[in-house]
Amino acid sequence: EETTEQQPLSSPITKRFERLRKRLLPLYSEAVPTELEETSNSTHPLFNTQSPQFQALNWLSNIDKSQITEEDPHIVQRYALTVLYFATGGPPVDHNTDFSLKRRGGPWRNPTN
């Protein structure tokens, strides 16, 4: 039976996710949690699954069509804009939106269009 209810992410932690997270970790002063602490209760924004930072990292790693890499000089800028989007309650992002920096640095389209 098919359901339309949105299911929680089973595990967004892919190799790509880990590479991007490793690149973004120096932006934060919080201690990286141990394996036992790596839950949604973690206080570190890149490990707390409920944080806008984690949601942005998940989007960049697993949904964004641009497939930005950790070596891209615009990764921090793109990540910051994506965090802002999730922190301000933007609607759910899916594969049909164009939440991207097509021309590196802007302008970028409204994700709800």
Image (tube, rainbow, N blue to C red):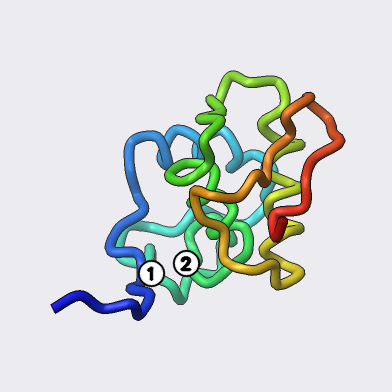
| Eye-nearest disc, 2 or 1 | 2
Q: x, y percentage for residue 76?
A: 71, 36
Q: Nearer the viewer, residue 57 or 108?
A: 108
Q: Is residue 71 left or right of residue 63?
A: right
Question: Given contact means CB atoms under 8 Å apart, are the residues at marks 2 and 1 in contact?
Answer: yes
Residue type highlighted by circle 2? Thr
Q: Which SS class for mark 2?
A: loop
Q: x, y percentage for residue 49?
A: 47, 66
Residue drawn at the location 58% of the way across and 42% of the way down: 25
Q: From the image, which quarter does the N terminus lie in?
A: bottom left
Q: CA distance from mark 2 to mark 1?
A: 7 Å
Q: Which mark is residue 60?
A: none
Q: Nearer the viewer, residue 46 or 80?
A: 80
Residue drawn at the location 63% of the way across and 64% of the way down: 52
Residue drawn at the location 64% of the way across and 68% of the way down: 91
Q: Earlier in the sequence, mark 2 or mark 1?
A: 1
Disc 1 designates what residue? 39
Q: Which mark is residue 49?
A: 2
Residue type highlighted by circle 1? Thr
Q: Is residue 83 left or right of residue 42?
A: right
Q: Is residue 36 left or right of residue 102?
A: left
Asked where in the image residue 30 lies, by quadrant, the reply is: bottom right
Determine crowd level at label 2: few under 14, some 14-19, many 20+ residues with C-alpha closer than 10 A: many
Determine crowd level at label 1: few under 14, some 14-19, many 20+ residues with C-alpha closer than 10 A: some
Q: Nearer the viewer, residue 81 or 2?
A: 2
Q: x, y percentage for residue 42?
A: 48, 70
Q: From the image, which quarter does the C terminus lie in?
A: bottom right
